[in-house]
């Protein structure tokens, strides 16, 4: 397949000459840099880079460029990815009763705002819960979770992830806490939307906690899931102003708007390889 | 003194007829309502109101209106205040090394944006720390605090508050934790600016905590001081977006702007009787 | 029908005693004020008020209260409304090719966030344009507009408004400019979402204008439609930060999120009688 | 002088290999890239870059690196600058009656937040206007402007700019419109703060215009001054929410906070070489 656009991300211990080496390599392969971001974490001594590039000759293939980059990558001990931007990633959406994030993601996907292959929608509630939503050809899986069958259902879920080649799992207001074991297995490829401005109001019913505390702004947080609940690397956050007039229910309503846009941004950036893990934090090369 | 403008605030158990009774009383006294806010807390059953009014006859005095209101206030078990807006409140500013909030408040006071009588500036650092700042005629008190003399210095501070008739104490980045005893004595008349978006990052060095956690927004919180550290009723909060590029020092710098405006708003609203305590929360009738 | 909650809005020339008169009247009718806002426009001398109330005796009917209020309303030359909050207003949605606002409003309507009766969806594009959207039982009308048939189609539209008893027409990214005549007829009951931060970038292709000018924030504006294009009374506005990286297409994408929430807020507030016209401006008693 | 940190900015017609060439050159000179931003304007075909770098050997001098870069710069027809970050730029502040931006900039300068050499403060009002402000050793020039002496005073101003080697002129709420001739001469090195969210409310008294129009947000705009009034390239903008309660005076008050932070950001970014002109727009590589 001829190369339209590709994106390279990398992180490695910092040292002089990385940019020169990488950009020279791409130039020698006949590539043109369209967009580049870099970040030098002076605290950890780690260097991060994202390069969007295309090929001067449109008949160029990506594979040899990727293969050829291995030598450079090894020389600098890089963690890296190089992907064709036209290849859509395989995404699984998990949802519970509240479907505002699901409806929002489906809409953005439909109009092409977030290009991806949604390979499954999974819920602990039955399909009828989302009666008015058109799931097109996306397979729906009902995996009801009880205290007793949780391990079993998680095993099914993981099997589904593996069989479908899922590259990203999105917890779109999925209200079941994943086990440590599953969280570990999905590390770096599972994004959750938490309905509070973390680290405030961890745990259950954050809007009710926020109402009880009397804060003047509420927020939402999209983060990678880790075994440590609500402590995963944060990708994006946003807030809205509230007042004493707002009941806990008003916060839930206002929060829906924040959750939708925060989760949508996080997913879009992840799929565009704009998010790179930096230990328990993230580097986000925003658009 | 003839009445220019006055403000009535009240809170009481809710029941039908409060607005009718209060507004009829003011009308009978020849007063005109300029601005009114009310809030009915359905959770606690408590009613809150703020009325700004003037007198149709400019020669009207406030005192008889205030005296006459007692009967109504008692009938509804109100906590209430009625103040002449032209009477400036007596304010004491406490500061430590970082003087950006102090400089900001002095500027707003000078140009008449926040009308008040600043009766003292108190610091645990010497006057020379603020060499370039013009304190006009405001008395400066140096009360250095050590582990050993803390109780003694707090006693001095409290004496100063009492002798000067201080009505509001502002902790304008005053970095000493007040004792429970002093906090209790200043309850409802001491405002602190905390340099985080509470309840996130309580305690020391919140910007460094925020940097370590990798949040994407930082904030500041103005709250009434209570014995329970960083748990006092919140008056105002605001945030700014940050990124992975920001070091802890960058957060400190960006935070200064947030702290200044959040504290200034909280003080202005308090002095305009726009803030009413609702147990451990606040009702803020914003301008 | 027994009275659950009702809302009274009024505006009239300001004079002392209005609040006392109105609140006393409601008290005498056995009503309890749940929420009240007022605004005294000192420039025009006009007074605005919104009161949400219920009845102490749940068997109370609204009609006699409304009838009885006429005397007071006449005495103060009020423009006023008094509505039962349980009666849903009849709303018509107009849309063109871009359906993000339509999809968003339908979702909010479905989950009960914006209670209303959507009596018709009208478009100058055919039903198939919105293939994936579930319109439930809402009638769809295709009124294609050409230069030649515009007057005729507007006549049909107006007839539809009248026949259906439409109380609010929403231009949810309806890209046809209404004629002066139609705008006049829908005055005060037609809300448009303009995809710019008015008064900047009036007219066509505002995101392209914004891109060309190099602004650093883009916005959207919900306003009542008047004959004077893009000059109608503004109900709500919001903005998002952009950068030099954003192409005009990126602005279109980012703008969708702003448009959706600004239009949804404006409609919700209008339907809750929170918006009162003040000549060519609005008084918005926000929630 | 040994090289601590330096910053290179450049813009040129885009073509493959620029990043490789520039980064390789710096690497060969023993330099380490600390921060890099680039932007490829696909509409104009122009490429923009900013690189912050230091030298591996701290004894390295900047001059030979700068001299050596000329060949590369010429080869790509670059407009470019390369500056030592420790060399503070020479800045002149112009002010009229309202001194909130001046006070704010002086404070930020004093605490080292905005490193610069303020070589003069110029006003059309006398020194006593700013009685409480400590100007330290900064020379103050009183250049009162009348209809008759405007050309003459502008000539004096320009002479002052030249004699002092002023590199940046800041119109910190300087309320005199510069002539086209002077604007042209200061092109690219004169920043103004306009007290509206441009392009809305150009010209005089923008807050009063905003109040009259009934907008729901107000803003401020920092831009380079050009002969075309209020049409210069925009560097930074910000907004705050307002309501019908706000009088024009309230907008003026709320606007002061926006103006201060918008102007401060624009100046800081300009002095850090983060702002590059792109015809009548700007590329801003934000911190």
Image (cartoon, coloured by chain):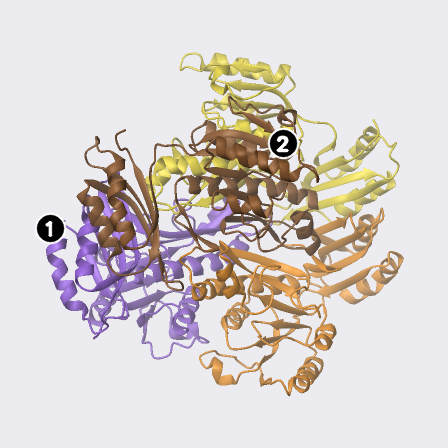
Chain colours: A purple, B yellow, C orange, D brown
Letter of the chain that mark 1 sits on in the rendering: A
Q: Nearer the viewer, residue A211 or A84?
A: A84
* Residue linked to disc 1: A75
Letter of the chain that mark 2 sits on in the rendering: D
- Helix or strand or loop: what does disc 1 sit on? helix
Residue B9: in sight, yes or no? yes
Residue drawn where x is 58% and y is 55% of the image = D199
Tag nearer the camera, 1 or 2:
2
Q: Nearer the viewer, residue A64 or D125?
A: D125
Residue drawn where x is 71% and y is 58% of the image = C281
Q: In x, y percent, where is residue D230?
A: 58, 51
Q: In x, y percent, where is residue A20?
A: 20, 50
Marks 1/2: CA distance?
Answer: 63 Å
Height in image: D86 above or below D197? Answer: above
Residue B225: in sight, yes or no? no
- Helix or strand or loop: what does disc 2 sit on? loop
Report whether B63 appears left or right of C93: right
* Residue linked to disc 2: D143
Report whether C12 appears left or right of C207: right
Q: Quadrant of the C terminus of chain D?
A: top left
Quarter of the view holding residue C57: bottom right
């Amino acid at each position: 397949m001829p190369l339209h656009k590709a994106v390279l991300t990398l992180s490695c211990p910092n040292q002089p000459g990385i940019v020169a080496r990488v950009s020279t390599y791409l130039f020698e392969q006949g590539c043109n840099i369209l967009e580049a971001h870099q970040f030098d974490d002076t605290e950890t001594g780690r260097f991060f880079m994202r390069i969007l590039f295309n090929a001067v000759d449109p008949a160029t293939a990506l594979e040899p460029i990727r293969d050829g980059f291995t030598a450079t990558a090894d020389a600098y001990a890089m963690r890296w990815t190089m992907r064709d931007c036209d290849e859509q990633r395989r995404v699984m959406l998990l949802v519970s009763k509240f479907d505002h994030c699901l409806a929002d993601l489906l809409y953005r996907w439909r109009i092409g705002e977030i290009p991806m292959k949604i390979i499954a929608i999974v819920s602990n509630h039955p399909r009828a819960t989302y009666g008015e939503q058109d799931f097109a050809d996306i397979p729906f899986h009902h995996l009801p979770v009880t205290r007793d069958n949780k391990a079993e259902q998680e095993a099914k879920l993981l099997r589904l992830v593996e069989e479908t080649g899922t590259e990203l799992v999105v917890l779109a207001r999925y209200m079941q806490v994943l086990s440590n074991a599953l969280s570990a297995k999905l590390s770096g490829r599972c994004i959750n939307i938490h309905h509070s401005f973390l680290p405030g109001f961890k745990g259950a019913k954050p809007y009710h906690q926020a109402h009880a505390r009397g804060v003047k702004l509420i927020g939402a947080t999209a983060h990678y899931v880790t075994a440590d609940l609500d402590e995963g690397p944060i990708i994006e956050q946003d807030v809205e102003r509230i007042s004493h007039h707002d009941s806990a229910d008003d916060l839930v309503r206002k929060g829906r708007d924040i959750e939708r846009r925060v989760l949508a941004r996080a997913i879009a950036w992840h799929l565009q390889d704009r998010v790179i893990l930096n230990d328990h934090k993230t580097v986000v090369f925003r658009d």
